[in-house]
Image (tube, rainbow, N blue to C red):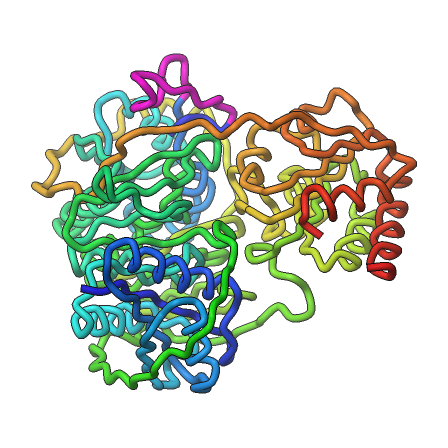
Amino acid sequence: MSVLVLVEHTDGTIKKKSFEAVQYAAEIAKQSGTSATALVLGTIADSELENLGTYGVKKVLHVADKRLNDLEARAYATALITAAQKEGSKIIISLHDINGRAVTPRVAVKLKAGLVAGALSYPDLSKGFVIKKAVFSGKAFAFVNITSDVKVITLMANSFQLNPGTGKATIEKLDVTFGDKDFGVKVKEVSKVTGEVSLADAELVVSGGRGMKGPENWGLIEDLAKELGAATACSRPVADAGWRPHHEHVGQTGGTVRPNLYIAVGISGAIQHLAGVNGSKTIVVINKDPEAPFFKAANYGVVGDAFEVLPRLTEAVKKFKQHK
Amino acid sequence: MPDTSTKIMLKDNDTAVNTQGVTYIINPYDEWYGLIRALELKEAGIATDVHLVTVGKADTEPVIRKALALGGDQAVRIDADSNDPYQTANYIAEYAKSVGYDLILCGKESIDYNNGTVGVMIAELLDADYIGFATKIDIDGGTATVKREIEGGEETDTVSLPVVIACQKGVAEARIPNMRGIMAARTKPLNVIAPAATTAVTAITSYEMPPAKAGVKMISPDDMDQLVELLHTEAKVI
């Protein structure tokens, strides 16, 4: 019995959120008196793989097939099943991100395993195998018990602090026999966003609402985001009006974000918007209306004109960075 | 699922959600994007029939009629209550096998349990391909061309039918049902079928409300240095 964790990488570099998944798997293994194994797919250097040892896995299985450099969900699932059989894994973990969500539900079906999507806690083994997750887009939490023998979990990123130790993982090459349907989706065209911080992975987010008055004023949001190294987001009316691209829309019918810091500028705080952001650790609300409902959900509030407050805040961040 | 403006309340010692006074809607991702794109494909002469399928008890029928008012030839209600994605997927996949659909559209996730797993599980059960987070869908003969969000960008894929595609913003524009649609929906077939035999592999044991915020600390709009200082020393986020 072991815990198996799927580790993603981007062109050979493992991201912080994947370290979090590895650490999460290692901790569950410890609690259940077993060990954790990481599975890495595609082209990546051994030095990067060994480094996973600092997050608690002893062994890394590597499938060095370059067809796996892009998300091939069915092939990934086949590799996970092969690895799970080899390791005798009863607990299988991935991130709750685009890749994990395309792969692990297939694994769960193949193994007739219960799945908790978007885990926020370690399993409570005293009550069975009970994991906390957000429901109703963050308006409440549910505790879900997995009752099957094999368990599958997708972990919500930014749920646990990283705590690297020391140690190197041993690397084992894994051969996988893929099925003839495993590469059925053909990629025609890829465009990666470069240079800006991806919203889903961002630790800091600056978000604008209707109070910004128009797309021509977004430079103020972008200046602050750039100074902070933050991603930019917006409320639904802003995306609907076409002021900002749809992928920036956060809220119950857009994306959900859980950054360390969410700065909301000119957003009143409708219940649908709050649902998409209330997992943020710290919320700053800047609004000229002191009655804006968002202040009730905020940690810090500023009542003032965004067009005056934003440049001042950007300047203050700049000063802070210089004196740090 | 509960309307997006619903304030969630718990009952029975936090083991259930209070449904009293809650207005139910079609999952917005299913309706605005999946259903409307299916209707567009029919209007363009690409799809011949559009079926609406849901898993739910009789109390879901008013919502199904609302969906039929937007369009679609018939609806199927699989008569079961399920909170377990694997079980839900099995119900739908078993029914889908009996019809043999070329294209199954769903939303990227539901706004109640936010799993986003049923679509991909259906694909696995049907031995079909799946594309998630789609923003544009075109069908030409037996091939779907799909633009989708990927980690850190977007890509365009081609895939052979049958395929399951989970939709999000971009796939179609939301519509409002017109009077003719609402009238027509009353007489469209709504078939109720018994669920296939499957066992749930997860169970929700209880719920919890998010902790109340400790209270907002107000900062003078003239003193952004103080805000930055607090974010650094108190909140420790920068």
Q: Is residue B138 above or below residue A45?
A: above
The residue positioned farthest toward the top in the image shown? B21
- Residue at image position (39%, 24%) is B24
Residue A205 x/y as whole percent: 67, 50
Q: Is residue A165 above or below residue B103?
A: below
- Residue at image position (52%, 48%) is B169
Q: Is residue A173 above or below residue B143?
A: below
Q: Is residue A166 above or below residue B14?
A: below
The residue positioned farthest toward the left in the image shown? B197
Residue B181 visible at all: no
Instruction: Check residue A199 for magenta coloring.
Output: no
Residue A66 visible at all: yes
Image-quadrant location for residue A25 = bottom left
* Magenta span: chief secondary structure: loop
Residue B62 x/y as whole percent: 32, 22
Q: Give B210 or A323, whichever is nearer the viewer.
A: A323
- Residue at image position (74%, 20%) is A291
Image-quadrant location for residue B179 = top left
Q: Give A72 or B104, whichever is nearer the viewer.
A: A72
Residue B142 x/y as whole percent: 30, 67
Q: Give A62 or A122, whichever is nearer the viewer.
A: A122
Instruction: Check residue B14 for magenta coloring.
Output: yes
- Quarter of the picture containing the N terminus of chain A is bottom left
- Quarter of the picture containing the C terminus of chain A is bottom right
Residue A316 x/y as whole percent: 87, 50
The boundaries of the magenta stretch are B5-23
> In this figure, what is the number of numbered marks?
0
